[in-house]
Amino acid sequence: MSHPLYFESIAKQLHRTLPAEYVNRIVGELTDHAEDATLRRNSGRHDDSKSDHSAVLGDVDTVCSSVVSQYCQQSLIGRHPWLQRRLR
C-alpha cells in the first residue's frame, strides 16, 4: 500500500516546475519502485504497514531536486541555460 501524502507532496512540488505529463509518469514510476522495494524488503510478505517510502526513495525535497535536475539535463537549454538568454 502506498502512502498517498508522500507521493502527493512530490507531485505538488514537481508540478510547480515540470510539465504535467512528465510529473504523472515520474510519480507512477516512483510509486512502482517504492512498492517493489517494500515487497523485496519484506521478503515476499505483503505487510505494507512497515513500508516507509522516504527510507526507500529519500525525503520529498531530495527526490524532487533529483527529478528536476534529471529533467533539465534532458534538453539543450536545460544543460546550457545561458543559451536561452542568448536566443532572445
Image: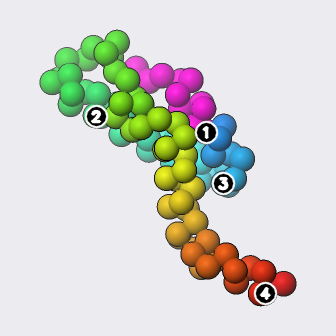
Quadrant of residue 48 in the image?
A: top left
Specify the label residue 87 is tagged with: 4
Amino acid beneath label 1: Ala
Q: Which mark is first along the chain, 3 or 4?
A: 3
The answer to whether one can see residue 32 in this image is: no
Mark pair 1, 3: CA separation: 10 Å
Residue receiving disc 3: 18
Label 2 Cα neighbours within 10 Å, binned few <14 / some 14-19 / many ≥20: some
Mark pair 4, 2: CA separation: 44 Å
Mark pair 1, 2: CA separation: 20 Å
Q: Are marks 1 and 3 in contact (CB under 8 Å)?
A: no
Q: Secondary structure at mark 3?
A: loop
Residue receiving disc 2: 37
Quadrant of residue 45 in the image?
A: top left
Question: Where residue 54 sits: x, y (%)?
Answer: 42, 31
Question: Where residue 83 sits: x, y (%)?
Answer: 70, 83
Please determine whether, in this image, residue 88 is positioned above or below residue 62: below
Query: Which quadrant: the N terminus?
Result: top left
Residue receiving disc 1: 11
Query: Magenta part of the protein: which range?
Result: 1-11
The answer to whether one can see residue 22 in this image is: yes
Q: Which mark is first along the chain, 2 or 4?
A: 2
Q: How many marks?
A: 4
Please determine whether, in this image, residue 75 is positioned above or below residue 17: below
Q: Are marks 1 and 4 in contact (CB under 8 Å)?
A: no
Q: Which mark is first along the chain, 4 or 1?
A: 1
- Front-lying residue, 47 or 65: 65
Mark pair 1, 4: CA separation: 31 Å
